[in-house]
């Protein structure tokens, strides 16, 4: 009888040890996955902020092109505009003799690109008739 009781104590210790190992692995896996998802979401937020800056730069070029078309009916674009400290956008070539006039701008900020195509009617004034973002020109 004494031998049976001794064997039972050894098995319960083994079950307890295996249970602790399994619980530790599950907790480590959960902790790792939560930390990793937080780490990845930081980069997603950073990419979204870069995209917002590139959209703002491209829109600034659209505003500049519309102002120059308002001032000079023969404005043909094809220039790089510097905005702020080292931030740039590009106004692609414009054909002012076509109605509606198509303005295409491109901006890049920290590898986030924005390509805009805007159609405007002129004169009198410059009126936007369509506005779209393109994946590429």
Image: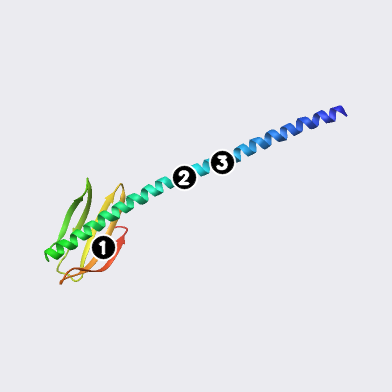
Q: How far apart are marks 1 and 3 (CA)?
A: 47 Å
Element class at badge 2: helix
Instruction: Tell me what residue is drawn at x 57 percent, y 38 percent.
Output: 28
Tally the numbered discs. Answer: 3
| Residue 21, percent from left and from top | 64, 35
Mark in front: 3 vs 2: 2
Residue 93 seen: no
Instruction: Tell me what residue is drawn at x 81 percent, y 28 percent.
Output: 6
Q: Give residue 38's mark.
A: 2
Q: Give residue 29's mark.
A: 3
Q: Name the residue under label 1.
A: 117
Q: Distance between the residues labelled 2 and 1?
A: 36 Å
80, 124: nearer the viewer: 124
Q: Quarter of the image holding residue 22?
A: top right
Q: Give residue 69's mark.
A: none
Q: Quarter of the image holding residue 13?
A: top right
| Residue 103, percent from left and from top | 21, 63
Q: Does 11 appear above or below 56?
A: above
In this rendering, position of residue 50 left or right of residue 86:
right
């Amino acid at each position: 009888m004494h031998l049976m009781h001794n064997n039972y104590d050894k098995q319960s210790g083994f079950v307890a040890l295996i249970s602790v190992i399994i619980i530790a692995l599950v907790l480590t896996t959960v902790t790792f996955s939560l930390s990793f998802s937080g780490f990845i979401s930081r980069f997603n937020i950073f990419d979204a902020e870069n995209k917002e800056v590139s959209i703002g730069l491209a829109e600034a070029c659209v505003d500049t092109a519309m102002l120059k078309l308002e001032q000079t009916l023969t404005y043909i674009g094809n220039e790089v505009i510097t905005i702020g400290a080292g931030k740039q956008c590009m106004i692609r070539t414009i054909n002012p003799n076509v109605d509606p006039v198509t303005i295409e701008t491109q901006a890049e900020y920290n590898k986030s690109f924005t390509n805009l195509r805007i159609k405007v009617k002129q004169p009198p004034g410059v009126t936007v008739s369509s506005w779209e973002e393109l994946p590429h020109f």
